[in-house]
Amino acid sequence: MEKQFIPYGQALELKELGFDEACFGLYAPPCKTVFLHHYGLLDAKEQHLAPLYQQAFRWFREKYNIDGFVRIEPLNEKYGFVIYNREKDNFKEFSTDYTKTEDAEFECLIKLIEIVKKTKKEFDKPFIDFAKQYVEQLKTKIK
């Protein structure tokens, strides 16, 4: 059943991106094993949510308008994945060299995280630049 949950490292990355939904499992550091979530059992500061793969993929679809899904290449019976950007209405296919669905699913999750991090960085940069300029203006006015 543990393979239904995304790995610990990716769970932390999703948390950084804002994932905060009810989950069946959690990670309780330093242990990187999934435990069934019994609300209130552990201090919230010490636990990290352990989403199911399907929860993570749904979250990307609902929050960022991007779909990731695994597909099989019929000619060589290998798995790959596709990322669909709903806003731009475009598809991008990725490697079809995986022999297991789970490997393609994991790599798809990694790619979704990478895309969102890059998008957030590009989106946040103008705001950060503006904030820095604003702070500098305030400093000159105070002097």
Image (spheres, rainbow, N blue to C red):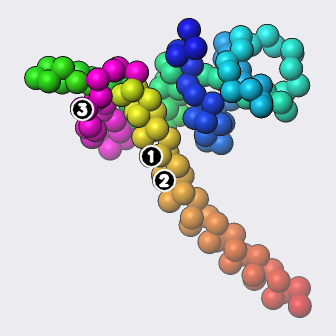
Write down the residue under mark 3.
96
| Magenta segment boundaries in residue numbering | 80-102
Q: Earlier in the sequence, mark 1 or mark 3?
A: 3
Q: Mark 2 and mark 1 in contact (Cβ < 8 Å)?
A: yes
Secondary element at image label 3: loop
Question: Callout 2, which amino acid?
Answer: Lys
The verdict on residue 81 being magenta is: yes
The residue closer to the viewer here, 17 or 140, is: 17
Q: Earlier in the sequence, mark 2 or mark 3?
A: 3
Q: Could you give the CA–CA distance between mark 1 and mark 3, rounded to whole angstroms?
A: 19 Å
Q: Is residue 101 at all visible to an observer of this figure?
A: yes
Secondary element at image label 1: helix
Position of residue 68 in the picture relative to residue 29 (left or right):
left
Which of the image's four quarters has the N terminus? top right
Residue in the image at 56% along x and 66% along y: 126
Above or below, 103 relative to 121: above
Q: Is residue 61 at all visible to an observer of this figure?
A: no
Question: Callout 1, which amino acid?
Answer: Ile
Quadrant in which residue 28 is drawn: top right
Spot occupied by residue 56 in the image (x, y as percentages of width and height):
53, 26
Position of residue 16 in the picture relative to residue 71 (left or right):
right
Residue in the image at 64% along x and 71% along y: 130
Write down the residue under mark 2.
118
Secondary element at image label 2: helix
Which numbered disc covers residue 115? 1
Which of the image's four quarters has the C terminus? bottom right
Residue in the image at 87% along x and 15% along y: 40
Above or below, 96 relative to 92: above
Which is in the foreground here, disc 1 or disc 3? Answer: 3
Question: Callout 3, which amino acid?
Answer: Thr
Label count reads 3
